Image (cartoon, helix red, strand yellow):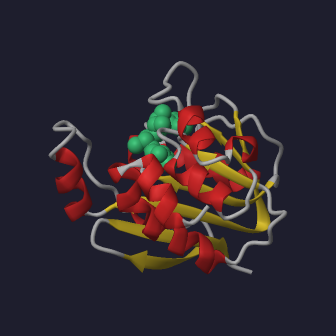
Amino acid sequence: MNIGQVKEILGEEFGRVIDFLSSVVVKLELAKNSKVLDIGTGRAHMAITLALHGYKVITGEPEGVYWADWRISAKKVSVEEMITFKPFNAENLPFEDASFDAIFLYATFHHIDNKERALSELLRVMKSEGRLVIIELTEAGINSVRKRYKSHPDAVDPRDFTKGLGLKVKVIESRDLNAYIYKRFK
Ligand SMILES: C[S@@+](CC[C@H](N)C(=O)[O-])C[C@H]1O[C@@H](n2cnc3c(N)ncnc32)[C@H](O)[C@@H]1O
């Protein structure tokens, strides 16, 4: 299935972000057998994008906070089997140390209460050569989301929380979304 068909099937909201999410995934050049974690399932835009690029993904969010039935969308574009859902809180992840090659948070970081605690958990479960990819809304992105969800929280720059953690960051910018790609200093 090509991206045009996926946009048609999954609709306008997904169509608006998939090009940027896809471009970030492609740029990372992850091996196809990479262990990939997606934090904050939501409507599963991130998990589905990863699956469409051929990556198996574990995705989750706190128990009882299911914003949408991600399975319905994943099924529509035939990637349900690539995605495993597990309820979890980013502040206390149910995974062994150094489990993942890549960890994605798309529009999730600003929703997490204790961001320092979550970052410590994310880095614990990330392999030494792994990538942490935090994709956040820009001011323009927040303004456009607020047309639909008036009380949406402010945008966050994750670099305000990652100083002193031994990470280097590369930023991919767009009008509505920025991707902050972290790896550890050698
Ligand atoms: C706007 S949605 C994210 C969109 C989603 N990543 C996607 O691809 O469609 C924000 C998500 O953050 C999740 N969230 C909030 N606090 C969290 C936490 N402490 N741990 C994990 N997920 C959290 C919410 O449950 C929600 O799914």
Residue at horizontal 18 percent and vertical 46 percent from the top: 146
- Identify whether 58 is placed above or below 171: above
- Identify whether 162 is placed above or below 78: below
Residue at horizontal 54 percent and vertical 72 percent from the top: 24
The residue lying toward the viewer, choosing from 99 and 68, is: 68
Residue 16 figure quarter? bottom left
Report the quarter where the N terminus lies. Answer: bottom right
The residue lying toward the viewer, choosing from 87 and 154, is: 87
Report the quarter where the C terminus lies. Answer: bottom right
Residue at horizontal 50 percent and vertical 59 percent from the top: 5
Q: Position of residue 92 (x, y in %)?
A: 65, 34
Q: Position of residue 57 (x, y in %)?
A: 71, 49
134 lies left or right of 178: right
Query: Is any atom of residue 161 visible in this view?
Result: no
Q: Position of residue 84 (x, y in %)?
A: 73, 38
The residue lying toward the viewer, choosing from 42 and 9, is: 9
